[in-house]
Amino acid sequence: MYEIRIHSRGGQGGVTAARLLAMAALHDGNYATACPFYGAERRGAPVVSYVRIDSHPIRIYSQIRNPDLIVVLDQSVMQSVDVLHGLKTGGKILINSTHKKDFFGYVTSYVDLTGIALRENLVVAGNPILNTPVIGALAGTGIVSADSAKSAIRSMFSDERNIRAAEAAYHEVRV
């Protein structure tokens, strides 16, 4: 089972990104679950979402304590939350950044999700929405296929800007 923990802030699209990722995994022929964890938070508060992907039925629906992959949609969350806590040895990190960040012992990928969202004008209440670009980036790292990522996005959003943002992130993600 492949386990992913997504760290974001309320209103950025982290919860929707988890749902989209699970849908894309289903399109790839896998089993998947998406589980958000938040209280009565407001826009801007830290939010954590969890995704499990497996080739066998998944009977666990809970928080993920030892993920294989950490996704960080907003670096400022790292000032108040230990996002690397429990990351498996040899685990991977995908971070929204314009440049590489090194985390000793982990493979780190990065992509400017914020810049992509702004280029495509994926903005709500002045804030860039990062859910569809991050699905493209995850497809770019091989977590799901690009076709499945696009299918999942199209099943939820009709605006083609979301597809363009995902495609851009797919091509721009760097290790």
Image (cartoon, helix red, strand yellow):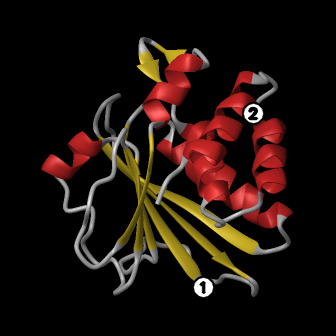
Q: Name the residue that disc number 1 marks.
A: 1
Quarter of the rendering containing residue 51: bottom right
- Residue at the spot 35% in from the left edge and 28% down from the top edge: 43
Circle 2 Cα neighbour tier, 10 Å, few/some/many (<14 / 14–19 / ≥20):
many
Instruction: Quadrant for the N terminus, please.
Output: bottom right
Q: Give the amino acid type for the residue marked by disc 2 in the picture.
A: Ile
Q: Name the residue that disc number 2 marks.
A: 163
Quarter of the rendering containing residue 42: top left
Please count the marks in the image.
2
Q: Which residue is at the far left?
A: 79
Report x, y in % for residue 57: 74, 84
Report x, y in % for residue 2: 57, 79
Report x, y in % for residue 112: 45, 37
Q: Give the amino acid type for the residue marked by disc 1 in the picture.
A: Met
Circle 1 Cα neighbour tier, 10 Å, few/some/many (<14 / 14–19 / ≥20):
some
- Residue 12 at least partly seen: no
Label 2: which secondary element: helix
Q: Is 81 placed left or right of 162 in the picture?
A: left
Label 1: which secondary element: loop
State whether residue 1 is above or below residue 36. Answer: below
